[in-house]
Amino acid sequence: MGSHLPVTQDGKASRELRLAAAGDIHADPPTRERICGHFRSLTGVDLVLLAGDLTTTGEVEQARVVADACRELEVPAVAVLGNHDWHSRHQDAIAAELTDAGVHVLQRGWITFEIRGLHVGVVGTKGFVGGFRGFQLTDFGEPLLREVYAETGDEVTAIESGLHGIAGCDLRIVLLHYAPTMVTLEGEPVSIWAFLGSDRMGVPIAEHQPDLVLHGHGHAGRFTGSIGDVPVYNVAVPVTGRPFTTFGLVPGSAPVVLDHSDG
Ligand SMILES: [Fe+2]
Ligand SMILES: [Fe+2]
């Protein structure tokens, strides 16, 4: 991480939020030391964002590894869950474990912080499937499929209302697990894109223009993308190749990737 502060045109140093993000940590007890070490080495950041799939197969003891790592943090941590965290149907216990460690677990929610004099808002939800332009699930046919469509619709509604909730913030961030654009899925087989996200989630993002959107889930996808002018990053660890990626955010400017070299 660098130590610069951006300078405005009038020569004054502006306030910068530094956040570290990671998705798809997929923790389990054998990786405890490595993962705790990664969290311990986080320095110079103001906020930690976790983009779901914190566990390998959704067991509480796997989530406890991340919870214990977060317990040592001196800055706020916000997490959404991923499909792996739901796999064993212990998603509520996993959320409780993380919450007990001080992590703000967002499930169709939003939260604000005052950091460095900045009002920072984070909308967080897992997101869901459905596909993208040209190969979208539609609201038609068997009730089960229509339930899937409706579930994604509820995620879209949560993103929309969350963005309303943080509308007045200096910095607005959307944290997801599933992808809201196919751009950051390039590299994944096109045949599975419909299971990796939905561009329906991109609609409120395009409308509200948050400063930054982060997601995971597409392990073989691409780091950088966008929805219109909104920057989107796939921070899945298998994509970034790093335990965390650090971003610098200044109100009114595009986010700067501070320590990512291989995206
Ligand atoms: Fe994953
Ligand atoms: Fe996932």
Image (spheres, grey):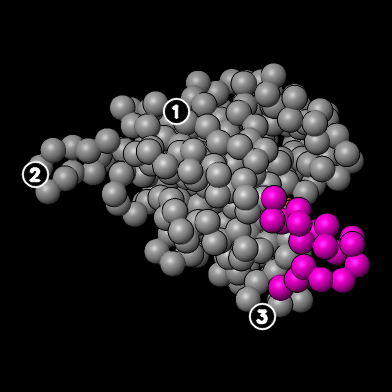
What residue is rendered at 67% in x and 50% in y?
155
- Depth check, front residue: 74 or 31: 74
Using the image, tell me which numbered label, if any, was put on residue 64.
Answer: none
Q: Tell me the quarter of the image containing the N terminus.
A: top left
**Secondary structure found at label 3:** loop
Classify mark 1: residues with Cα within 10 Å, few (<14), some (14-19) or many (20+): some
> Residue at position x 55%, y 49% from top?
160
Instruction: State the separation of the CA atoms marked 3 and 2.
Output: 47 Å
What's under tag 1, amino acid-wise?
Phe
Cβ atoms under marks 1 and 2 closer than 8 Å: no
Q: Nearer the viewer, mark 1 or mark 2?
A: 1
Q: Is residue 116 visible?
A: yes
Left or right side of 231 for 136: right
Give whichever of discs 3 and 2 has the lower sequence position. Answer: 2
> Is residue 59 in sight in this rendering?
no
- Name the residue type under label 3: Gly
* Disc 1/disc 3 C-alpha distance (Å): 39 Å
Q: Nearer the viewer, residue 236 or 164?
A: 164
Marks 1 and 2, how far apart at CA: 27 Å
Q: Which x, y percent locates residue 130?
A: 73, 65
Residue 180, by quadrant, is bottom right
Tag 2: Cα neighbours inside 10 Å, few (<14), some, or many (≥20)? Answer: few
Helix, strand or loop for disc 1:
strand
Q: Badge 1 is on which residue? A: 113
Q: Tell me which residue sits at (65%, 72%) in the image.
A: 132
Q: Which residues are magenta?
A: 136-154
Residue at the disc numbered 3: 134
Q: Is residue 73 above or below residue 78?
A: above
Q: Nearer the viewer, residue 254 or 227?
A: 227
| Mark 1 or 3, nearer chain start | 1
Q: What is the three-letter code of the residue carrying label 2?
A: Asp
Report which residue position mark 2 lands on: 10
